Amino acid sequence: MKIKLLRALLLVAVICTMNSCSSDASDAPVVDTTSQKVVNYSYNAIEIETMDLINSYRVSIGLNPLEKINHMSYKSEEHDNYMIANNVVNHNDFVARSENIMKTLGAKTVSENIAYNYSTPQAVLNAWLASPGHKENIEGNFTHFGIAIKEDPATGKKYYTNIFAKI
């Protein structure tokens, strides 16, 4: 019964956060095979800048800064790669990502923001803050986050996946 309720709540969360986010190199991960937790992730400069901007914004409104977790960034990167490979911008398989993060990291809640085709970290943050559902995630009661920003080699356009969790 709890599993069914959790899945239903996750589905509602996904639907509530599925606002459109369009317009405007990491090394192979090290995986702890006992828990399948990714323990190493190589962040690029744009990812670091975006996380810093999100934390600066959170602190400016009196919230705690979020701590990055490599496993969540790896799951974000998997989703970016999926969106690039399939030429889509969506939250497909969010339930599987969130369940993995809950099981692997002990997260109590998980949310996700995605975006496409923003050229700078400030531009994507501005777009997320202008969207009520995305802003709610950025300002949410979370303790940790992960992010991946990957460029489609065919188009040069950037794909963003930002996962938030309370652990």
Image (cartoon, helix red, strand yellow):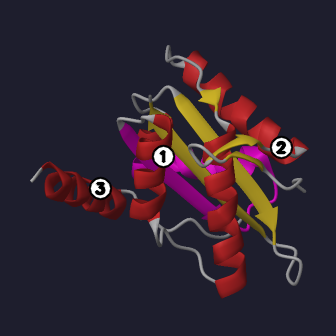
Compared to residue 100, the image places residue 94 above or below, namely below
Compared to residue 140, the image places residue 10 above or below, namely below
Distance from disc 1 to disc 3, alpha carbons, whole Å, reads: 13 Å
Between circles 2 and 1, the one closer to the viewer is 1
Q: Which residue is mark 3?
A: 10
Magenta span contains residue 81: no
Q: Which residue is mark 1?
A: 101
Give x and y (percent) for residue 39.
71, 39
Please name whichever residue, 9 or 51, is drawn nearer the observer in this view of the structure.
9
Quarter of the N terminus within the rendering:
bottom left
Magenta span contains residue 118: yes
Q: Earlier in the sequence, mark 1 or mark 3?
A: 3
Distance from disc 3 to disc 2, alpha carbons, whole Å, reads: 28 Å
Between circles 1 and 3, the one closer to the viewer is 1
Instruction: Determine the secondary structure under disc 2.
Output: loop
As shown in the figure, which amino acid type bears the numbered disc 1? Ile
Q: Which residues are magenta?
A: 109-134
| Discs 3, 2 touching: Cβ within 8 Å | no
Compared to residue 91, the image places residue 124 above or below, namely above
Q: Which labelled disc corresponds to residue 43? A: 2
Residue 125 showing in the rendered view: no
Give x and y (percent) for residue 31.
71, 47
